[in-house]
Structures are given as C-alpha cells and as structure tokens.
Image (cartoon, grey):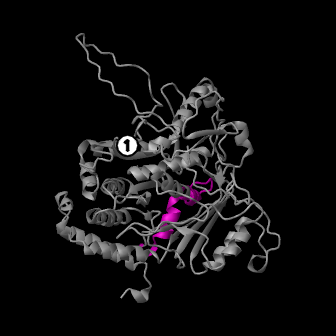
Amino acid sequence: MSSREIVSLQIGHYSNFVGTHWWNIQESSFLYSPSKAQQKEKEVDHDVLWREGSTLKNEVTFTPRLVAVDLKGSLNTLKQEGILYETNQQEDIKWRGDITLHQSSPATKNAYLSELEKEEQALSGEKGKMTDSLEVKDDEDMKETSSRSGKEEQHWDSHVVFGKPFHILDDAVKVWSDYLRVHLHPKTIQIIEEYHHLNTLHPFDIYGAGLKAAEDFETKMALEDKIHYFCEECDNLQGFHVLVDTHDGFGGVGAQILQHIADEYSSKSVMTFGFTPSSLPDDTPVKRANRILNSALSYQKCFSQSSLFFPLSLANSLWKTLGDFAEFPHLDYKLLDYHTSAILAATLDTASLPYRTVNPIHLCDITNNFQTLGKKIGSLSTTLPIHIDTESNFLDMVQDCGDRRPWLSLTPHCTNLSTPFMQSVVVRGLPERTPKSPRGIYSSCRSVNDILQVYLTENFNSCLNAGSILKSPCHVGMPFPHIFRKNVNKSGFISTTERPRFQGVDTVPVMTSMQSSPDTAQLLSTLYTEAKKLNIRKHTRYLETGLEEDEYQEILQDIADLQKCYLPKCDMG
C-alpha cells in the first residue's frame, strides 16, 4: 500500500457529479494487463486515492478511498451498499401466516450502464484469472469493449462505430450514478434521510439545514465511522480531499465534517474544493439571497478549517446573477451538470498530479507554500485541451500566446491576470516534439519541460513557480460527455480534418495553473459587499436553524480580514 494516502469526501449532489467524472477519468487510465503494464513507465501512483481490498469471495477489488454524501432519491439505479459484497441470499422469513409482498419497479439503467453490465457479465468467467494477476498501472485503459452484433437492438442514445459503442448521454443522465463506471466500497455512500432530492416542498437549500442534518446523532455517527474506517486502514495518511457544494444545505454538512477532521486529524492537510453549479434556480430574490448567504457561511468555514480552499464554477460571477460562463475555444458544452462537472473534474485530475505521482511530493508541500501569511484561498485555471495541432509543438503554443495567459480561470471573480504570489503549473499529454528552430530565450530548449521552465521564469519572475510535466494525457473516453468540437481529433490535438460523426475523443493534453493570486481579493470583496447588504433578521429560516446576528457579523468580518491578505501593503489601510 502507498505511504501517501489521501481520503476523499464528496459532499453534495454537484460535488458527486464532479467526483464521479474524476474517478472515471482515473479508472480509464488503469492497465489490467501485466504484460502491457511492464512496457509502460509508471507516472501516477493510484494507491494515493484508491484502496485495494477483497470481497467475501476473496476477489481483489480496487475502489476509491471515498465517503460520498447525498440526499435520499439521488442514487437512481445505484445501490447504497454497492454490489461488490452481495451474497445473493434472500432473508429467511420465519413467519408462517399470510404474507403480502409490496414490490416497486426498479429504476431502469440507461444504455451506457446496460452496456457496462453486459461487459461485466461477459468477463465474469475470466474474473478469477484476471484478479490473480491484477496489476493496476497508469496509462491507457486496456479493457476490451465487446462489440454488439448488427442484430442487437439499437438504443436512441447509442451507436456502434468501428465496433465500439458510442453513447450520447446528455438526456439520459439525471443523477451522478447514471454514468458511474467504477465500483464503490459499501462504506462509501452516506444518505441524509430527512431530505429528498429535488423536493421543493421540503428543500435542502440553506446552510443551517445542513448543519442540523449533520448534527443528527445517527447521521453524525455514521459519517464519523466511515471517515474513521478509511483513515485507519492507511499506512501514512497525508490528508484529505474535500469536494463540497457551497450554494445550498450541503455547505452546512461540509462545515460539520471539516470541523470533525480539524478536531480528529489536526496534523493532516485538507484541500477543499467548493463548487457552485453553472445552472441554478435563480428566478426570485429569495433564491439569489440564499445563494449569497450560503456561500458566505460556507466559504468562511471552508477557508478557516481547511489548509487550502479553492472556490470553483464555470460561472464567472456568482452573487447578483450567475454568468458569464467560461468560454473554451475548442469546447461546445451545455449548462448541464453532466457537462460542466466534467470540465472541472478534468482540471482537478490534472492539477492534483504533482502529489499523486510516484515522486515523493506530499499534499502539504502544496498547502504549506500556498497559505503563507494567511492566504487560505487559491484559484484554479485550465487549458482544455491545449491548443496544439498535429504538426506543432509546445513552444509554438507558448509563443502564439504572447502576453496572454494560456489558461482560463475557473474560480469566479478571479481573472488571474495579475502575477500570482505562487503557482503550481501542470502540463500533461504532450509528445516530445523538438522545436525546429528555437530562438531568443528558448534557444537552448530541447524538451517540453525546458520550455515550461523558461516560460514560467520569464513571465512570472516575481513569484514562486513549480512546473510539472507528465507524459500521460487526460482520458476523456466514455462516459465523458461529447463536448469537444469537431476539429479536435481523437487524441485531443487540433486538426484541419473533422472527426467522423460518431467518433469521440479518447485523450486530451491539458494544462492547469493552481495559484495563490492577488485577484482573490476581488472574489472576497464582492462576496463581502453583497452579503453585507442582506439583513439577516429578514431571513428567518437561517435564524431558526441557530444562526445569530452577531455570529453572522463575525463571519463577514473574517471574510473582510482574509481579503486584506491579498492586497498590496499600500492598499491595506
């Protein structure tokens, strides 16, 4: 087992959307063939986020080290306990009287999940042989997808291209489990039973509702037991990933969990990612006010109880109204949770690579450097995919950018145009094409790493830079949504020839920048300004769940104080 384990927590429906894509992306890079694995250089240590176990039949499993929290009715076809430990034994009923059986119709799996189920059934005969020699390595997915015959029924959202199923799931995905391709441990999912997903009569829409739900004795004990279970099996736990919805009641659940981690695992690093979906009910002043209040309360708890906190959304502004939305030159995405969460997941998978590689870098190496002088909030930017065509190289892309930044910010209200205090840049999936005739400051560059280091030194010479290069691209095959424009080929490079109609993109090169930036002051300033305009005494639901007026004013002051950490000394007054 790895000595640098991280326990992940996904708190909220949208966070589970992001997390599901993230686990799918990672699993797509696993190698299950020992012979193929030996031929590939291992870059990523999957044991950091995944755990090896065994079923009741002694079958080897590899599942995320994860606790996922959601509401009742949010799982659709997924069983809360998963299927890895099913015994297929029916309960022995001792009652000898009359029995009335009430049976509801099970939820129907979409075409993609049905295809996965058929694939597993086809491989079940060989499963014993495979698990004896299972070796999970980094790179491309080596599992063969069984092709369907021409006589097989075609689904409305499915096509077969070159023997491979091509699914369009935009209308089929209702919840995050509708595209989950990995198996989960029985202790992973925690359901909050008091609230039902999408119930407008009893909504889970305010921070205080989450606090109360997480304070429930049974829920509290169950959550702490699950966290303890995954932490105790680690050899050397380095910290936690916390993905949390900050716009609704899950912010309160996240606050309680972060407090528990701070109390019980105070020596461990906690990197928290706070998400706001790009599409939210926003048609009344009350809903807009709730979003601002929930964000203020959640942000304050996240940055105070985490080592480092990254607010993330594809909406560039969050407070008065949602929008404008991030525009990527080579993506055509819809404002669906299924689409927007995929972009965030590909970004997180790339940005987190420095402390997930086989190199001995720890999560605390990132968090300790970023949080100097009280700077507890970071920003995250991405280039998805990197703008490189089939004939050009990384140097061409860097020089074409000129004074422009090569990435786009995913942290609302942060343009990331200012020179950061510190940044961690990751470039993955680029071939080592030697520049034909490098000139000027790049004249001595012979590799992608050389080019990156020179670029960072010349363009960000007043900040602390860390650059990482990985050969392995980001895997965006099914069930990643089809959001790439037709000029992106199946390997993620820009091409003059359009992809065939029913051919997807398998891999893409990605570049991310994780920053501690002066632009964070704008995020905190706008949040403080809008939250201060709201009279908390008029929002009685918050007061009824225990929030006091003095406490709210203290929270606003914490936000104002943190803002000062990002201002030049001359502006701090």
| 67 versus 520 height, above or below | above
Residue at left offset 59%, top offset 72%? 465
Asked which secondary structure carries label 1, the reply is loop
Whether 364 is among the magenta residues is: yes
User: Does 35 lie within the magenta span?
Assistant: no
User: Which one is nearer the viewer's eye here, 228 or 476?
Assistant: 476
Q: Quadrant of the C terminus?
A: bottom left
- Please identify the residue farthest to the top as the structure is shown: 96
**In the image, 558: left or right of 168?**
left
Q: Quadrant of the N terminus?
A: top right
x 72%, y 42%: residue: 38
Question: Is any atom of residue 2 visible in this view?
Answer: no
Percent across and percent down for residue 279 are 41, 58
Give the answer, above or below, for where 276 lies relative to 316.
Answer: above
Residue nearest the viewer, comparing 169 with 543: 169
For disc 1, the neighbor class at 10 Å (few under 14, some 14 to 19, many from 20) is: some
On the image, the x and y values in percent for residue 131 come to: 60, 30
Please identify the dominant SS of the magenta region.
helix
Q: Is residue 139 visible?
A: yes
Quarter of the figure with residue 312: bottom left
Where does residue 103 sit, x and y in percent of width and height? Answer: 33, 24
Q: Quadrant of residue 289?
A: bottom left
Which residue is depicted at the point 69% across and 56% down? 471
Q: What amino acid type is highlighted by mark number 1?
A: Ser
Residues shaded magenta: 347-374
Would residue 75 appear left or right of 511 to someone viewing this image? left
Residue topped by disc 1: 74
